[in-house]
Image: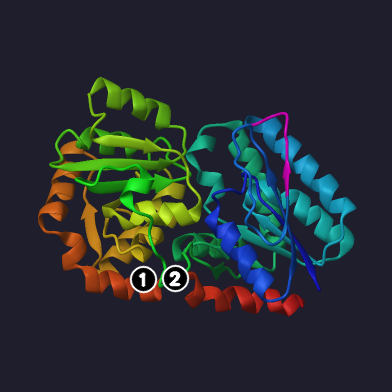
Amino acid sequence: MKRIIISVSNDLYSDQRVRKVCQSLSDIGYDIQLLGRKLSDSKEITDRAYGIKRFRLVNTKGPLFYAELNFRLLVYLLGHKADVLLANDLDTLLPNYIVSKLKGIPLVYDSHEYFTEVPELKGRFAKKIWEKIEAHLFPKLKNVFTVNKSIADIYSQKYSVKINILKNLPNKSDNFIPEELSSLELPTNKNYILLQGAGINIDRGAEEIVEAMEYVKEAALLIIGSGDVLPKLKIMVKEKQLEEAVFFIEKQSPTRLKSYTYYAQIGLSMDKDTNLNYRYSLPNKIFDYIQGGVPILVSNLPEVRRVVEEFDIGLICPDHNPITIANYINQMLDDNFKNSHRTQLQKAAQQLNWENQETILRTVYTSFL
């Protein structure tokens, strides 16, 4: 059995893309070793049928974190046998590339976002370092995946490399049975609007969504997940006395998150066009909403707009004014959008699932078996 070592920079618990890739690779016959990191608040992972190792790092952010992570990955990869290496995102690529060359084994690169354009790097010297690493390594890569056409086109034009598109689609939910609202500790007499994700950060529209709840009728907002803007949002909720309209829920397992999604009337994705990474983003949550039969309200960005318009499963909000957002939410609630567009949502869910695009992944990885 061929062994693949998969490198990731997060704590693995809620990374649905990596989880689905691992399952697909296991199904086609790979022995998997998954590498990530363990934080002080990381939850235990007990439901995977493959090897998992999470490094405890002294540094948790900034240049020292990336240096330590890359060093630990390099040492591990040098000391362990592998037939294939998979690097997820630019922050794990360098050690994987070095080891693939030293050992003469195939390397696959999966870019989950337009990494050098993330807002955290804007105006910082670190951005130049990552750009140099990318410019040096990317033209040498032979097996590359990314999440949507916009990012694939950018990389292909910059580096003249063929890019495989593997969207962040969820598995089919045909036989899913949701938990009862009572077991989710939610009131049964409210309409729920949902904002979920592992990157609820600045410039992703969360602040304006919370402000919009002052003007939304007979509904409550669920914010589920993690991100750097959450402390600010909690202060806003308290100051505006919105405790009965906005609920914060910590990140959930993928299965439990599906239950929360099931009960939502609207799913939100309101990233701002403040950087190229957000402009061309196509978040996991979009497809999680669709698979759960939930219509979406999105900001006017090309990739999410394309999905909404192609399948007629939501509305496109023209700006981030809280009153505008509230008006669109109220319109969707008044029109009972979830029920009136049930057929469109079912059609989208039948097409936009992991199983329908798995052939793309299999074609690349079976060539190494």
x, y percent for residue 167: 48, 65
- Hey, which quadrant is residue 211 in on the image? top left
Left or right of residue 270, residue 63 in this image: right
Dot 1: element: helix
- Tell me the magenta residue range: 53-60
The amino acid sitting under disc 2 is Lys
The stretch drawn in magenta includes residue 175: no
Mark in front: 2 vs 1: 2
Quarter of the figure with the C terminus: bottom right
x, y percent for residue 155: 55, 60
The residue tagged 2 is 172
x, y percent for residue 338: 21, 61
The residue tagged 1 is 349
Foreground residue among 162 and 184: 184
C-alpha span from label 2 to label 1? 8 Å
Please indicate, yes or no, whether residue 280 appears anywhere in the rendered image.
no
- Hey, which quadrant is residue 340 in on the image? bottom left
Mark 2, other Cα within 10 Å: few <14 / some 14–19 / many ≥20 = some
